[in-house]
Image (tube, rainbow, N blue to C red):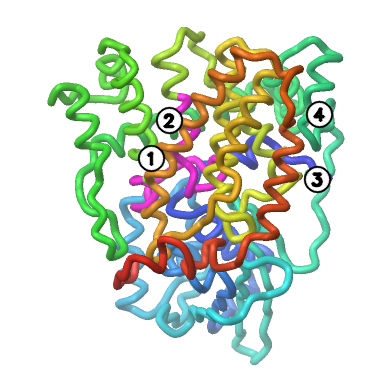
Amino acid sequence: MQRISVFDMLKIGVGPSSSHTMGPWRAAQRFLSEMSSEKRLRIEHVTVDLYGSLAKTGKGHGTDVAVQLGLCGEDPVTIDVETIESRLEEIRNRNCLVVSDSNEIEFDPRTDIKFHWKTQLPFHPNALRFTAEFFDGTEVQETFYSIGGGFITKENETPSSSSQMELCFPIDTASELLAHCSKNGCRISDIVKQNELCWRTETEVDAMLTSIWKTMANCIYRGCHTEGILPGGLNVQRRAVRMASKLLGGTSPTGLHEWVRAIQQQPHDFQRVLDWVSCFALAVNEENASFGRVVTAPTNGAAGVIPAVLFYCCYFCDVSEDSYKDFLLTAGEIGCIFKKGATISAAMGGCQAEIGVSSAMAAAALAECLGGTPGQAVQAAEIAMEHHLGMTCDPVGGLVQIPCIERNAMGAIKAITAARIAIQGDPAHARVSLDDVIQTMWETARDMKDKYKETSEGGLAVQIPVNVSEC
């Protein structure tokens, strides 16, 4: 199988969806980057065709937003998220965008982005096609698939050399991971780090882990300090800011570190800790729903689970200051195993592929950081996923809001419970392995009707009438 880095699973970007926003954004960037600069200057017109799930929930998930920003050369890691709305307004008002340093072309997002609701391409439900027409009458057309978690693949392409990297410890299944840990007498995070060092230096690995941790922390802080209504037309009120204020007794310390210190100084009774974990998860996904900066973990729709459990681990448990590194390495590897053995795309597997996978990732990571054995950590992942099997993806109005935001809180709580159960038990007595549950998840995904796979054609999505406006 292809080799996947932890940093492919945990990516900094912009909400609200990894498969419907991040993936199409990267596809637009790649479409242009594969042309020479001279060729980009000769583009006269660009059209974008969206198919399957990308068409059905593209408006609510911001797919149209993503392709416009990607064609303009913006990057989801570095873009100032505060400027997104003004950039889109400028494109709408002027009916043009800049696809190269100096090539301004006519572009009307209302007609040049086409939603093919009834057409699905055979390889994957998330498909989009870019067509560039040149001044000499020729054109270039490329089809991409957004396959979950921000990953994209171009039609008929072969795997890159980096995805075939020879790693110290090749891992495709949970049993292989455990075998490496047993043979070498080390933890999951130790094995994973050695693999990451095949791609980059230790300094780079540590810097990237710290950047992800800081992005998650800043996202939680922003979400707990931002009021208002989420965009899109559902009129969903932000709740994390009120919860955080209430939990802190109405005080509002200035700055992330002071705010965290105030949280740590509170009594750590069960109910308060439970409320904080839920608050952290809600905060991240309210930011995600507002085109805020999040970490895809392993998707944007499930971006709140891992940060919430990581905050719980670092600030409510007795762990070392650098535990976030081991947490992220372990979580990332569990996500890689799920991607290889099943899917992390809700359009392929429903919400079990997003919230379920993120909960399993967080459970394993927490168990490791709390001193659990590799077997206990893997068992924690199994327990978490076992109780997400069959969960459908049915976003109301095609927006990553209802029921997505609350599901992140539930996924975080399940992860903590799964980790606690696992480290109190003996994995040798477990009747279900992580590999068993991954196979079951994939079989469940294939049996699930398409209307429950991020199409907004079933479940809650059809029970609540709503007139969703353009994001």
Which amino acid, by three-letter code, is at mark 4? Ser
Q: Which residue is mark 3?
A: 2
Separation of residues labelled 1 and 3 (CA atoms)? 30 Å
Task: Indicate whether residue 303 is drawn in magenta.
Answer: yes
Q: Position of residue 290 (x, y in %)?
A: 34, 52
Which amino acid, by three-letter code, is at mark 3? Gln
Residue bounds of the magenta highlight: 286-310
Q: Which residue is mark 2?
A: 308
Secondary element at tag 1: helix
Secondary element at tag 4: helix
Separation of residues labelled 1 and 2 (CA atoms)? 8 Å
Q: Which quadrant is home to the N terminus?
A: top right
Q: Which residue is mark 4?
A: 175
Task: Indicate whether residue 186 is drawn in magenta.
Answer: no
Secondary element at tag 2: helix
Residue at image coords 71%, 45%: 440
Which amino acid, by three-letter code, is at mark 2? Ala
Q: Between disc 4 and disc 3, whose residue precedes?
A: 3
Closer mark to the observer between disc 4 and disc 2: 4
